[in-house]
Amino acid sequence: MTIDIQGISKRFGTYAALQDINLRVGAGELVALLGPSGSGKTTLLRIIAGLETADSGTVLFEGEETLNRHPRDRRVGFVFQHYALFRHMTVFNNVAFGLQVRPRGQRPPKAEIAERVHRLLKLVQLDWLADRYPNQLSGGQRQRVALARALAIEPRVLLLDEPFGALDAKVRKELRRWLRHLHEEMGITSVFVTHDQEEALELADRVVVMSQGRIEQVGTPGTVYRTPSTGFVYEFLGDVNRVECRVESGQVLLEAGGTPLGGAADHAGPAILYVRPHDIELLPPDERLGAATVRLVHEVGPVTRAEVEYAGTLFEVVLPEGGRVPAQGELVRLSIRRGMLFPRERDPGEPPRPFLPFRSGGPTPAVNLGPHTAGMG
Amino acid sequence: MLHWLTLMADSLPSLLWAALAFTVPLTLASFALGLVVGLMTAVIRLFGPPPLAAIVRFYVWIIRGTPLLVQLFLIFYGLPSAGIVLDAFPAALIGFTLSVGAYTSEIIRAAIGSVPKGQWEAAYSIGMSWTQAMRRTVLPQALRVAVPPLSNSFISLVKDTSLAAAITVPELFQAAQRIVATTYEPLILYVEVALIYLVLSSVLSAMQVRLERRLARYGGFLEARS
């Protein structure tokens, strides 16, 4: 089933939680709402579920207006961050409850309810815990019961609010993979909220990046990661160096000190350069360019990171696997291979400029940018 | 000593009869009716329209702010002047019901409020109406929180029914007073009455323990989330 979100706005007092949100979720899609806390992602999810009302705008399910419908009539399965299982009932009854409370005409016979509940509990691999109470289960098990409970009512849409937020890292990864399989199997249109970029990129068909009540970017995990359309998305999705600089005559200069880093076309003036740590290369020092100093080297699992100071600015660098690891205090040359420039003042929707790296030889941009390409010491 | 024991034994049947015929029925009936009033009052205060909520708040204020004995006198001796004449037992029943209703409404209100909002939302999201959510998920969980303070009210009530003696209900305490009037043995009789009240409240305390144990099956009190 498709979900159309049109012009949704919501205020809490003077605080604008959502501002004119427009989004279409296709049938069978798995969409992630990704953003920091306070970005409005949970509010949007709750509006879709009917647990919160919007100030303006509308939500259509399969083209049909839903906003004035009570949550119970929307046939939306909702999975809460803190599970919200009915703690006075066994696992079996938690899952069966949604079917047991239906009006007599729509209620399946007892045997059918039991069969369906056991099938769902098998699906979430908890059949053996049917007679336990929620407080006798681990966090991961509770969340799977919550999922089975949401699926029992055969929802048209499955909404998950930070479903793995309260779980530890290992369980979270396991459940993530498992949910992906489940979605592929059942194909229910699903929307989940997360502040974990890794979770969003791994799980979702499409990622909606939100900030301060607005949508920053919508795209496939690959698109939002490789070509972020705003500085916010760049910073939120993965580690990134945020470098204040200015562009003069086609050269990108460090704001502090004016050291050239590379080239840029179509822009002059202050800008912010975003560079991912693995897009920086450390080369043997070169007298003409002024050396950078390795300040810190630390290994995190398989990845070796270095903090490198160049002309008074600290850069975070991820070293290629298997390469030589420089020593602390060593002099190196810092070469930025890829980056994105966001002019300080730009119209909303205006695309960022690509950063043009120097040719490997020296401070000359890889493309000819006119006369101002003099080398500096 | 022997004199004490024979007097106690001789008066026991009529005292027990008064307890069984008046004290116990008055306690049970006014507590049951009071709970209904308390539940309705709590629900109106939490979810009702503001004018209605204001009325029940006024009711709770009046009942909690005036002595129970004065309320009983008003109902039994005062109302006839306004043309409403009640027998002693119904008058006591009304007085105690109103009192129980006011006090337990606060307990029930707090207990309902202690059930996390997520429980309502979870109930709605699997297709329940407000009434279903209230009856089948919120109240059962609120009950667990409410049992200890409600038991308090119940045990107080058993003893408070002795006030009905003042409006001519022939309950346990009044029966004792009558025997004292003929035997002139207040010490023995009132000790005996106190012991009977003690037995009654002990039975109730034991019932509370059993009920709590039953309700605790599905989890400890300290667990905030499930």
Image (cartoon, grey):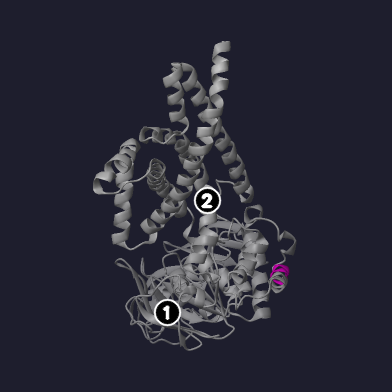
Residue at the left extreme?
B81
Residue A200 percent location from the top left of the image: 56, 72
Quickly name the residue at label 1: A67
* Secondary structure predominantly adopted by residues drawn in magenta: helix
Q: Residue at x 46, y 71 (%)?
A: A46
Magenta stretch in the rendered image: A117-122
Quickly name the residue at label 2: B143
Residue at mark 1: chain: A
A88 left or right of A347 in image: right
Q: Secondary structure at mark 2?
A: helix
Kind of residue at badge 1: Leu
Kind of residue at badge 2: Leu
Of badges 2 and 1, the one in the foreground is 2
Residue at the front extreme?
B182
Vertical placement of residue B24 versus A178, above or below:
above
Vertical placement of residue A135 versus A198, above or below:
above
The answer to whether residue A308 shows anywhere in this view is: no
Residue A198 percent location from the top left of the image: 57, 69
Q: Nearer the viewer, residue B46 or A29?
A: B46
Q: Quadrant of residue A177?
A: bottom right
Q: Nearer the viewer, residue A309 or B153?
A: B153
